[in-house]
Image (cartoon, rainbow, N blue to C red):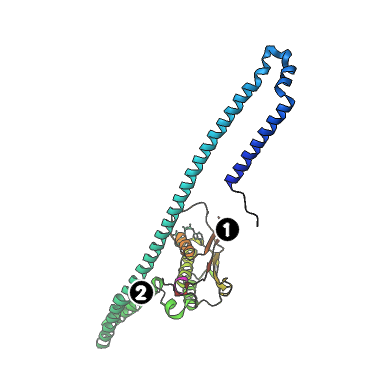
């Protein structure tokens, strides 16, 4: 394959061409005795001093060369500054990415610990209160029995709320049953919470051997995307697809994630400072994936990601 000429080799070539042209001109002008020839032809214009033109032209050429040299130096300095700024920008982007990763890690750790507290503390105490309430219910008669059974109902309700909260914070099903079942459960829950939205779901390929980080990423993407659908879209239809395609043998093993709704969309040029979409993009790019948001006013909202499976199996969240 032919290699591209570099900037310095192009400059050397240009200088060579100029030198050759000057040499050729010098030889040619000596041969034809240009000055004498000019002098003869312009003798009758002596009053206009046309024969002095070569010296003036020489000064002009020298001036132009100086001018070009100065612009060239300026362009070089400008280019140097721009390259330095680009390097700084790349470093800042790297730093930004690192901070985003730390933010996401901290968020996951915080969710895990809140879920544990809810389960271990609140959950245990609710159980204890219910046990006590049941034993009181057995010992009292009306009208206190009605009050106690109302207390038991409230405790059951609170229990269900806490269980849902724990599941949102830390998808236990993900650890215990794998991504496929955890997603099925999550989608079922969201469908119940959004009865007016028609869900179209496709979970394809082996989703249970993707490793903890990638599984958690896909779970969080689905969670946030569906929260956005319910908060912002006013859609009647949403399509969710998580599909594992390709094979590890040729390195094409990857997961495609998409959540597309047919709702009111958003103006892509306007950012309202939400962290959901930014966090989703960070999660995808952290794993070397590609991320794409397509939307427009009244044109629905489409999220698309493609994440390589790579060697993430051993990774931890
Ligand atoms: N499915 C959707 N339909 C319409 N607009 C959406 C949708 N998802 C996100 N948006 C728009 O993008 C913005 C940013 O979303 P996000 O980053 O998740 O932040 P938040 O949900 O906290 O507002 C939302 O405020 C909304 O205007
Ligand atoms: Mg959001």
- Location of the N terminus (image quadrant): bottom right
Q: Mark 2: which secondary structure?
A: helix
User: On the image, which quarter does residue 257 sit in?
Assistant: bottom right
In the picture provided, is 176 more to the left or to the right than 269? left
Question: Residue 202's spot in the image, x, y percent?
Answer: 56, 73
Indicate whether 245 appears above or below 78. Answer: below
Residue at image location 49% in from the left, 62% down from the top: 285
Please determine whether, in this image, residue 128 is positioned above or below residue 268. below
Q: Locate the C terminus by quadrant.
A: bottom left
At horizontal 28% and vertical 78% (from top left) the residue drawn is 125
Confirm if mark 2 falls within 8 A of ligand 2: no
Residue 194 versus residue 302: which sits nearer the camera?
302
Q: Main secondary structure of the magenta part?
A: helix
Can you tell which mark lies on residue 299? 1
Quick check: can you spot residue 272? Answer: no
Q: Residue at x 46, y 47 (%)?
A: 84
The part of the chain drawn in magenta is 210-214
Q: Position of residue 117 (x, y in %)?
A: 31, 73
Contact (Cβ within 8 Å) of mark 1 with mark 2: no
Place of residue 295 in the rendered image (x, y in percent of width and height, measured from the top left) = 55, 58
Residue receiving disc 2: 162
Question: Which is nearer the eye, 302 or 21?
Answer: 21
Q: Is residue 196 magenta?
A: no
**Mark on residue 314?**
none
């Amino acid at each position: 394959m032919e290699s591209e000429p570099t900037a310095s080799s192009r400059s050397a070539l240009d200088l060579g061409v100029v030198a050759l042209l000057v040499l050729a001109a010098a030889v040619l002008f000596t041969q034809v005795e240009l000055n004498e020839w000019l002098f003869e032809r312009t003798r009758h214009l002596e009053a206009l001093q046309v024969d002095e033109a070569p010296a003036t032209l020489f000064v002009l050429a020298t001036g132009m060369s100086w001018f070009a040299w100065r612009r060239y130096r300026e362009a070089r300095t400008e280019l140097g500054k721009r390259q330095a700024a680009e390097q700084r920008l790349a470093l800042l982007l790297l730093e930004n990415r690192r901070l985003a990763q730390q933010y996401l890690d901290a968020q996951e750790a915080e969710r895990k610990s809140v879920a544990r507290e809810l389960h271990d503390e609140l959950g245990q105490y609710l159980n204890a209160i219910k046990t006590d309430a049941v034993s009181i219910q057995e010992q009292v008669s009306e009208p206190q029995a009605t009050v106690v059974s109302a207390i038991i109902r409230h405790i059951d309700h609170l229990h269900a709320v806490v269980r849902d909260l724990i599941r949102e914070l830390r998808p236990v099903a993900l650890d215990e049953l794998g991504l496929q079942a955890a997603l099925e459960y999550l989608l079922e829950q969201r469908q119940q919470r959004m009865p007016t939205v028609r869900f179209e779901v496709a979970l394809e390929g082996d989703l249970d051997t993707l490793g903890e980080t990638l599984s958690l990423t896909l779970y969080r993407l689905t969670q946030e995307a569906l929260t956005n659908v319910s908060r912002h879209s006013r859609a009647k239809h949403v399509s969710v697809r998580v599909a594992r395609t390709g094979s590890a043998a040729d390195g094409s093993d990857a997961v495609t994630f998409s959540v597309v709704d047919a709702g009111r969309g958003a103006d892509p040029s306007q950012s309202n400072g939400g962290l959901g979409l930014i966090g989703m993009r960070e999660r995808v790019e952290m794993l070397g994936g590609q991320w794409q948001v397509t939307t427009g006013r009244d044109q629905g909202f489409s999220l698309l990601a493609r994440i390589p499976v790579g060697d993430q199996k051993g990774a931890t969240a």
